[in-house]
Image (spheres, rainbow, N blue to C red):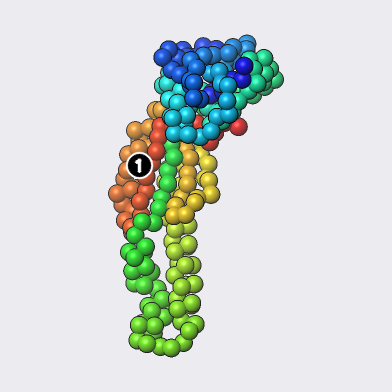
Amino acid sequence: MALYVYAITGKDHPQRLEGLTGVGSHPAPVRAVAAGPLCAVVSDVSEEIRPKRRDLQAHQEVQERLMADAVVLPLQFGYIAPDEQAVRQALEEDTDGYLATLERLDGCAEYHARATQVDEDELLRHILQDSAQARELNERIRSGAQDPQLPLALGELVAREVRERQDALAAGLVQALTPYAREHVTHPPSPPDFLNLSLLVPHERTDDFLAAQAGLAARIGGGVDFRLNGPLPPYSFVQ
């Protein structure tokens, strides 16, 4: 039978899986398949698994239960193996690599930081206040100047200023937070976000990291929402 694979752990992981059921319309108990020093946490499936809300929640519940006790290598949603033999073979083919990654991630959790411009009017006011060129263009438009190039020029200037300010702010946030992390990954942000940052934070640095993020969020202003999600399974750092 096909197996849905949630994560890889070391054989010494407690694997408190009692009461957990997996993904699918007929959820099966979650269990472990062992191969040498490694285990894969799986459940039986007999159908194609799609990212429905219930299945996404089941996937995440397994990850959270596992990471509460020890380090895990979480798999992204949707990984299915044809049978137990295929799972064991995959573990055996890269045992050293999986063990090295478990060691690298041990004692850490992922945190996900995003920044979004939620008040564009406030940002525009700052740009008009700080940029003499933008103020001049805006005043000419408001006074009734008929030059059709003026709105285009102002729009291009404002867009450039927005990019530059957001890029500078994103770089400053990354610089301020990464000293608390063992590793970090900067992802391409999707609008309206202008920062999408994953950080691998050691447990002993968590309090300092959270305090630093909260302080930054309180000081940013400028109509920016700077938020944090975590602790999470370290998806971004499994190679």
Q: Amino acid at mark 1?
A: Ala
- 156 relative to 3 in the view: left or right: left
**Front-lying residue, 44 or 94:** 44
**Front-lying residue, 161 or 21:** 21
Q: Quadrant of the image for the N terminus?
A: top right
- Residue ID for mark 1: 212
Instruction: Please determine whether, in this image, residue 32 is positioned above or below residue 133.
Output: above
**Residue displayed at 42% across by 46% down:** 114
- 106 relative to 218 in the view: left or right: right
Label 1 Cα crowd, 10 Å radius (few <14 / some 14-19 / many 20+): some
**Residue displayed at 47% across by 29% down:** 55
Give the residue furthest to the left: 218
Q: Secondary structure at mark 1?
A: helix
In terms of image quadrants, where is residue 112?
top left
In terms of image quadrants, where is residue 136?
bottom left
**Residue displayed at 40% across by 34% down:** 230
Q: Is residue 95 visible?
A: no
Q: Is residue 141 visible?
A: yes
**Front-lying residue, 158 or 101:** 158
Relative image position of residue 42 (x, y in whole percent): 54, 19
